[in-house]
């Protein structure tokens, strides 16, 4: 009963998001959500860009962007994920629920002072992370340390119940980010694809020297275990959008 209810809820959500009169059907507008976090003990207004990133709009860190440690949500700029019978449009619908869910409650966060490669402040928000993972809206994502066991347990429950992104099943590896060898600003280590182990939560960088075409799928696994992500360079995600992103704006027959 739980699996059937989860799948039905996911289909209803996708239909609502992609209906011809909806914002998502008309264009690539991002469904950011305003909310509050308690950051370093200070009650702070923020705008959630998605479930793992927010823009700080007041307080000591005003004007900065922050990235949650330990979880990863799906991309919201277009239908770029595909796995386990879940279409790119269905996974995009899941992705767009992350920001509103994260912003629905006051979240308690801590900042350790570190930044990621994009200059975002790295923060931990345990209750937001667990809410997102428990509902299958985010996946556990550990890069510099072992994954949080509490989050892994929440993810196992979501996978068993076929919730959110796991409605069709959980492939062993999921691409979280892909980079072409001809991208600018890759740094001394060059191009890599980041693969996430859906059992351990480990996000492993796989170096490579391949040049990807715009809209090329980069995949891991075979058959039912295959998971793919479509390559779109950063500068084309919101301007001069390629056809693989603009498909989300058109109605399917």
Image: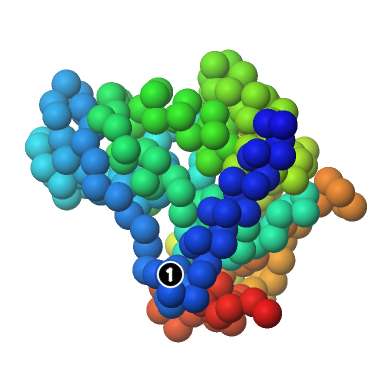
Q: Residue at x 32, y 38 (%)?
A: 104
Classify residue 219 by image quadrant.
bottom right
Residue highlighted by disc 1:
22
Residue pushed farthest left? 59
- In the rendered image, residue 102, in percent from the top left (x then y), is placed at 37, 39
Out of 69 and 7, give the one closest to the viewer: 7
**Colouring of the image:** rainbow
Note whether 239 is above or below 84 in the view shown: below
Out of 17 and 205, give the one closest to the viewer: 17
Q: Residue at x 65, y 39 (%)?
A: 5
- In the rendered image, residue 112, in percent from the top left (x then y), is placed at 30, 26
Note whether 216 is above or below 5 in the view shown: below
Q: Which residue is drawn at 72% across and 31% down?
A: 1
Q: Is residue 195 left or right of residue 154?
A: right
Classify residue 107 by image quadrant.
top left
Q: Can residue 188 be seen in this view?
A: no
Classify residue 79 by image quadrant.
bottom right
Q: How crowded is mark 1: few (under 14 residues within 10 Å), some or many (20 or more)?
A: few
- In the rendered image, residue 3, in percent from the top left (x then y), is placed at 71, 35
Out of 35 and 15, give the one closest to the viewer: 15
Out of 39 and 32, give the one closest to the viewer: 32
Q: Is residue 10 left or right of residue 125?
A: right
The image quadrant where one finds the C terminus is: bottom right
Q: In this view, does 176 lie to the left or right of 124?
A: right
Note whether 140 is above or below 83 in the view shown: above
Q: Which residue is drawn at 68% across and 31% down?
A: 2
Residue pushed farthest right? 223
């Amino acid at each position: 009963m739980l699996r059937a209810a989860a799948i039905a809820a996911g289909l209803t959500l996708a239909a609502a998001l992609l209906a011809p009169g909806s914002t998502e059907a008309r264009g690539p507008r991002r469904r950011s959500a305003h909310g509050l976090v308690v950051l370093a003990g200070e009650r702070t207004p923020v705008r959630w860009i998605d479930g793992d990133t927010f823009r700080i709009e007041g307080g000591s860190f005003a004007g900065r962007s922050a990235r949650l440690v330990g979880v990863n949500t799906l991309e919201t700029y277009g239908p770029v994920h595909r796995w386990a019978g879940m279409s790119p449009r269905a996974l995009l619908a899941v992705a767009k629920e992350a920001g509103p869910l994260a912003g629905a409650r006051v979240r308690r966060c801590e900042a350790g002072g570190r930044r990621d490669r994009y200059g975002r402040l790295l923060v931990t928000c345990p209750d937001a992370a667990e809410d997102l993972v428990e509902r299958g809206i985010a996946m556990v994502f550990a890069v510099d340390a072992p994954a949080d066991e509490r989050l892994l347990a929440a993810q196992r429950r979501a996978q068993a119940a076929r919730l959110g992104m796991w409605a069709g099943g959980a492939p062993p590896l999921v691409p979280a980010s892909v980079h072409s060898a001809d991208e600018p600003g890759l740094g001394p280590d060059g191009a890599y694809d980041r693969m996430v182990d859906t059992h351990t939560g480990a996000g492993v960088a796989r170096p490579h020297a391949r040049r990807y075409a715009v809209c090329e799928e980069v995949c891991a696994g075979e058959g039912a275990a295959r998971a793919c992500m479509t390559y779109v360079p950063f500068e084309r995600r919101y301007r001069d959008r390629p056809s693989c992103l603009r498909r989300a704006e058109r109605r399917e027959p």
